[in-house]
Image (cartoon, coloured by chain):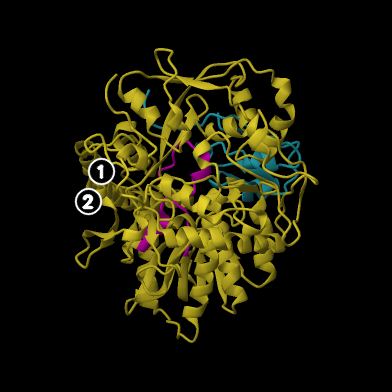
Chain colours: A cyan, B yellow
Amino acid sequence: MAIERIDKEKCIGCQKCVDACIMDVIRFDETEKKAVIKYPKECYCCYNCEVGCPSGAIYVDPRRLRPITPAWS
Amino acid sequence: MAAQCFKTDVLVVGGGLAGFHAAITAREAGAKVIMVEKNYSGTSGHSTFARDMMLFHEEWGDCLQDWRDQFIHIGEYINDQEWVDILLKEGYDRFRDMVNWGMPFYLREPGTTGFPGDDHPYGNAVMSDKIGFPKPEEEPFRYRHQRTKYRKSTAIIKFGKREKLMDARKKALSIGIEIIDHVMMTELIKRDGRIAGAMGFNTRDGGVYVFECGAVVMACGSLTFKPAYFSVQCNTGDGVAMGYRAGAELTGMEFGTGMWVCKDVDSVTIDGPVAELGLTEDCFTNGKGEEFLDDTAHLPTNIHWPLEVHKGKGPLFHEPYNYDRSNFEDALKKYDETAEGPWLTMMDRAGIDIFHDRFEQYMSFIGNIWPGGLKINTKCETSVPGLYAAGDSAGSNFTGPTYGTLGSGMCHAAVTGHRAGKFAAEYVGERDSVTFTQAEIREFEQAVMGALERGYGFTTEHVLTRIQQTLFPYEVRIIMKEDRLKAALTMIEFFRDHLLPKTYASDFRDLRNYHEVRNMIVGAEVMLKTAIMRQESRGWFFREDYPRRDDENWLKWIIAQKGQDGEMTLSTQDIPMEWRGDLSLPYEERYMLQYRLEED
């Protein structure tokens, strides 16, 4: 659901996703020098991270973790 | 950590298209400029996802009167027509500014004329392949939003890439604008009745930031409630709330926006993709399997759909005809590259084949994007000296209760951003700046960070969920009625008076959530009270207790302002007589959109 993984093998530590995330979900681990998912519940599936990642390390499922009250059911 | 203090001439709050136009224009006029953004300037806000801009240019054969008429008919005479003219006439210069900053656009295929959507069976599925920098007077690729035929006059250009604002960021940094990211502004500061500064905090390390400045341009985007539509998640009415608390007038706040989403993949609107891919043979059915939209559904109406559900004939479905997907390979690829989101990828991953599967959809109430905000004059001044507003934060009333054409939001952002920057820089001029005392700074720190100190009580997530549960059911803000609006207002007031004071933030990131829900509550209160006041229907503003336009009593704008005693005051301003159109026309001729509330 939502942002599911950042593949550590593929991540080159460019931080493009950290800057691109509109909800500040992704942070940079200074020790491992890789991007990490910190606040997955805040992810609204905009795909900025996956689309912008130069090494295809990120996978986002289109359904959020946090449900939103629908207009009608 | 001690608060960090900054001095500047013009503080631009918000790093989207409006903010960049304001900052660059003010800087080029000689002002010292700081741009501050709660996320990252260049990838955040609604502008990031917009891919179109309305562009009028007489030299390319556009007829001003036709474009004006479209705006005014769809806006149902509530538009501020001075702003309509300004947008149409100044959009071209703003477009040239952006090209000069290094923003690429889609270019016209050499040797072609006209608009591709006009005669192609797949509408806008035909797109240019070329991206670049149009020379002066060279017409870029333009198209018309074919599916909504009542928007037939206006033409739209396409930004050449998704990260368009990163070019603006490069330009801003190159001319000496200081950009501070991950700092959320929470309050304006006034002295002697005018703007003296603003306060906020860093969402990463919790540092308090205090700005002393001569003018603030509020470019924080619109008021939304984190709906099912991903483009607007950053836009939680921060500008509207800060301005309101500082005493500025707001207008157009009663109007709202909904978007069509697929029920199982509700993060992105499907209206755009269906139109842009030219899936013109699709249709929409109700729970009885009937097609329920008439010709006026091609208007920018969001009312017929929830009305169908209200009449008990839901749910609603998108019914594809059996398209051969290979006909759309090119369009699919281009769409996913340029669109708001990789919509087709998203649907694929959810297991939905848009070409063959029937899927359920609903309307997500979003908030107030284009119509309302901080009331501005043509210099983008609000009623608070030194406070300017631009983009979706600004209530110019250019579009009335609806959205007159695709791309008008970005045109509005660019044109108002430029004007706000220009006039803010002029205002600052020779003004002395204020310096805050240590005691004042300690008060600011407490105001910004207070919610972090609680450690227990209600979570910010709980407050957000409650706000959404209150406002998102269609019967509250889309098919409206006085008793339901008052019920929602009662809840919002409870959240304001009881929940919020007992809410805590768990970390610096959550403190952003806290201030966002705090701002949403302010915006919701203005939105609901002004909606209760307008006793008529008009455009997207539909009330089942007043289902007709009331030209005699409601050709007016509603203005909301915090009074001296802290309570909201509401007033009205008449639409000038010369803007009211032909009042002698029969109702069905004057208003293209008919609601059809009657039971079948």
Residue under the point 51% across and 45% down = B405
Quadrant of res B24 = bottom right
Q: Chain of mark 2?
A: B
Quadrant of res B398 = bottom left
Asked whether disc 2 touches disc 1, contact meaning CB atoms under 8 Å apart, the reply is: yes
Secondary structure of residue under mark 2: helix
User: Quick one: which residue is furthest to the right in this view?
Assistant: B110
The 10 Å Cα crowd at callout 1, few under 14, some 14 to 19, many 20 or more, is many
Q: Which residue is mark 1?
A: B536
Residue range corresponding to the magenta coloring: B218-243
Where does the image place residue B486, in percent across and percent down from the top left?
A: 21, 41
Residue under the point 62% across and 60% down = B92
Q: Which residue is mark 2?
A: B553
Residue B251 or residue B10, whichever sits in front: B251
Question: Quick check: B403 left or right of B440?
Answer: right
Question: Distance of mark 2 from mark 1, alpha carbons?
Answer: 9 Å
The answer, for residue B268, to whether it is visible in the render is no
What amino acid type should be assigned to the residue bearing mark 2? Asn
Where does the image place residue B226, in percent across and percent down from the top left?
A: 44, 42
